[in-house]
């Protein structure tokens, strides 16, 4: 028996990996984060038990995993995006290790990748930014020393900020001294879902633009010069060899 932590991707059911889809369709037990994973991701399953864990606490979830283990049943534990990023699987894995229950992580398409696709941009460009920082805005979860937003902003790298749209004004205030008020910003709501919404602007005007919408959660913030860069060197990947 194995617990498979499966990345369901950002929302579009077609963005689940082939391996993840196969496991969802064959595992006898499915536990999925219903608030973020669309039910279409679970289509074609033949599971004996399908549980939406959106309202369950950690103890209840682990109890279900332990019950499946006692019965020798594989579990598809389905998370949104890629489970290794803000998927809260670390605490589940710690419990599984203590109980001697085997597990495996199946990667998924990240929200950041889906947002870049929605915008039609590359997040790393020569001479503009070769670094991507994925972070979250500190609210309930404390940030380690040196990982405050202002600390990361000093690098002026492309930045993807999770769980921060409700605090956009404060985020802009912290980023502007490092990126400049004219730095491009995009706020993408439910990337790859049918109701996806994109708001683009600069650090100077993005707050007002987002306030004019109904976006309050489930949105990712992308910041960086790559979002509208036109002047950058060609990659050496496709360069002709020197004669």
Image (spheres, rainbow, N blue to C red):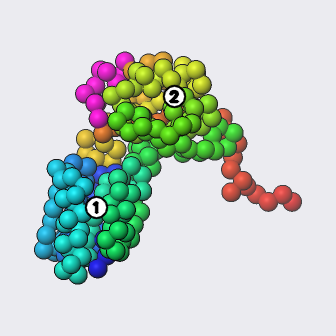
In the rendered image, the residue lying farthest to the front is: 98
Q: Nearer the viewer, mark 2 or mark 1?
A: 1
Residue at image x 63%, y 40%?
Answer: 129
Chief secondary structure of the magenta span? loop
The answer to whether 111 is drawn above or below residue 138 in the figure is: below
Instruction: Return the residue at label 2.
Output: 184
Name the residue rendered at 47%, 41% in the picture. 135
Label 1 belongs to which residue? 78
Circle 1 sits in a helix, a strand or a loop, which is it?
Answer: strand
Quarter of the image with the C terminus is: bottom right
User: Looking at the image, is 156 positioned above or below residue 90?
Assistant: above
Label 2 with label 1: CB-CB less than 8 Å = no
**Placement of 217 over or under 110, stated as above or below:** above
Above or below, 232 against 29 in this view is above
Of the image marks 2 and 1, the number of the one nearer the N terminus = 1
Q: Magenta residues, as a range?
A: 208-217
Where's residue 36, x and y in %?
25, 49
Magenta stretch: includes residue 22: no
Image quarter of residue 170: top left
Q: Residue at x 34, y 36 (%)?
A: 140
Q: Is residue 214 left or right of residue 82?
A: left
Secondary structure type for disc 2: strand
Identify the residue at image location x=30%, y=57%.
79
Q: Badge 1: few (under 14), some or many (20 or more) residues near its Cα, within 10 Å?
A: many
Residue 171, image x, y percentages: 45, 26
**Residue 156 horizontal/vertical position (percent):** 61, 33
């Amino acid at each position: 028996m194995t617990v498979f932590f499966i990345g369901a991707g950002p929302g579009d059911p077609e963005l689940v990996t082939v391996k993840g889809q196969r496991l969802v369709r064959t595992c006898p037990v499915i536990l999925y984060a219903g608030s973020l994973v669309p039910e279409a991701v679970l289509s074609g399953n033949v599971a004996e038990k399908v549980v939406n864990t959106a309202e369950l606490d950690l103890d209840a979830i682990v109890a279900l995993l332990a019950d499946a283990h006692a019965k020798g049943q594989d579990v598809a534990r389905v998370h949104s995006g890629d489970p290794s990023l803000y998927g809260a699987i670390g605490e589940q894995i710690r419990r599984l290790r203590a109980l001697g229950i085997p597990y495996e992580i199946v990667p998924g398409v990240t929200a950041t990748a889906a947002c870049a696709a929605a915008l039609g941009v590359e997040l790393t460009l020569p001479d503009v930014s070769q670094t991507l920082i994925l972070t979250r805005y500190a609210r309930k979860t404390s940030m380690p020393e040196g990982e405050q937003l202002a600390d990361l902003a000093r690098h002026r790298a492309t930045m993807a900020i999770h769980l921060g749209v409700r605090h956009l004004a404060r985020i802009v205030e912290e980023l502007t001294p490092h990126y400049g008020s004219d730095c491009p910003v995009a706020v993408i709501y439910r990337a790859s879902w049918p109701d996806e919404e994109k708001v683009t602007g600069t650090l100077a005007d993005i707050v007002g633009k987002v306030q004019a919408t109904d976006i309050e959660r489930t949105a990712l913030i992308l910041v960086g010069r790559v979002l509208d860069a036109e002047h950058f060197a060609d990659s050496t990947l496709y360069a002709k060899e020197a004669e």
